[in-house]
Image: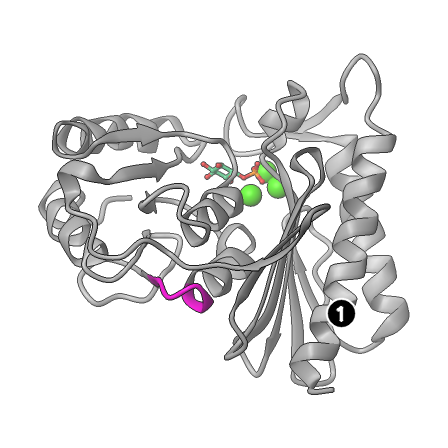
Amino acid sequence: MSLAEELLELALATARETGRMLVDKRPATGPDVVQTKSSPTDVVTQMDRAAEELVLQRIGAARPGDAFLGEEGGTQDGDGPVRWIVDPIDGTVNYLYDLPDWAVSIAAQVDGVTVAGVVDMPRRGETYTAVRGGGALLHTASGTRELRVNADVPLERALVATGFGYDARRRAHQAEVLTGVLPNVRDIRRGGSCCADLCALAAGRVDAYYERGVQAWDVAAGALIVEEAGGRVAGLDGAPVSPDFALAAGPGTFEALHDLLLPLDPARD
Ligand code: IPD
Ligand code: CA
Ligand code: CA
Ligand code: CA
């Protein structure tokens, strides 16, 4: 077994255990908001923290010494080439409201390159996995299938997923950008979980995704899943994907959406 496959196996077992815990232990009246971050809409619940602790505990026990970057602060330096990038609940607002589209996202990097990624969506009964160079898979109770993005979808027939960061100033700008995108595409979807949007793209359920203000833990696993499903993930104007901008789509559609977005969304902060 290669190192990437070993890391995937650990990520898969950990994501599934954490996903089950989040379903089983979600308080019947909903989780408590224990903190707000960049704005009152940027919430953290006790379950975000419990999930990240469980992931850190399981990965730390199996591979002490690996570096770790988690959204809820479970960051630690390592003494080797492996770093884990973890979003314990991607789609916290969906989880808070008991909407099904939230996920546990775990990516493993070796020397800064993502080599394995898992996105587990227990309320949908779906787990997405990818190993660099090994394709992307969707696992459900009825079996496992290989994923392929839709290619060369003209913009007027493209279903485009997007998301909005929590910062109010950025949101106003994102709304402006949206007014330039919406008349040019089939429609927009705002699912509420960045990694779920990327997996939907990999599965051909949407044709493209873009968002300003995403963080490494939002995109790390989902980006590998998209790339292994034949898609492209990058920033604008030749930049790599970063908190500035993430754009993902199949070949052909990527370039068309990129050219639409570039004049609409000059880098602003
Ligand atoms: C958020 C979700 C959302 C996206 C936000 C993210 P969180 O992550 O992925 O879809 O629009 O930018 O911050 O806070 O639920 O982990
Ligand atoms: Ca969050
Ligand atoms: Ca997230
Ligand atoms: Ca999160």
Q: Where 186 sits versus 262, above or below?
A: above
In the rendered image, which quarter contains the C terminus? top left
Left or right placement of residue 1 versus residue 139 in this view: right
Camera sees residue 85: yes
Colour scheme in use:
one colour
Residue at which label 1 appears: 9
Question: Residue at horizontal 13%, vertical 27%?
Answer: 183
Q: Out of 54 and 120, give the one closest to the viewer.
A: 120
Q: Position of residue 56 (x, y in %)?
A: 80, 58
Q: Quick check: is 55 in the magenta stretch?
A: no
In the rendered image, which quarter contains the N terminus? bottom right
Q: Which image quarter: residue 90?
A: top right
Q: Quick check: is 229 in the magenta stretch?
A: yes
Q: Which residues are magenta?
A: 227-232
Q: Out of 58 and 196, give the one closest to the viewer.
A: 196
Q: Position of residue 151 (x, y in %)?
A: 26, 57
Camera sees residue 216: no
Q: Position of residue 247 (x, y in %)?
A: 31, 53
Q: Amino acid at mark 1?
A: Glu
Question: Residue at horizontal 65%, vertical 35%?
Answer: 124
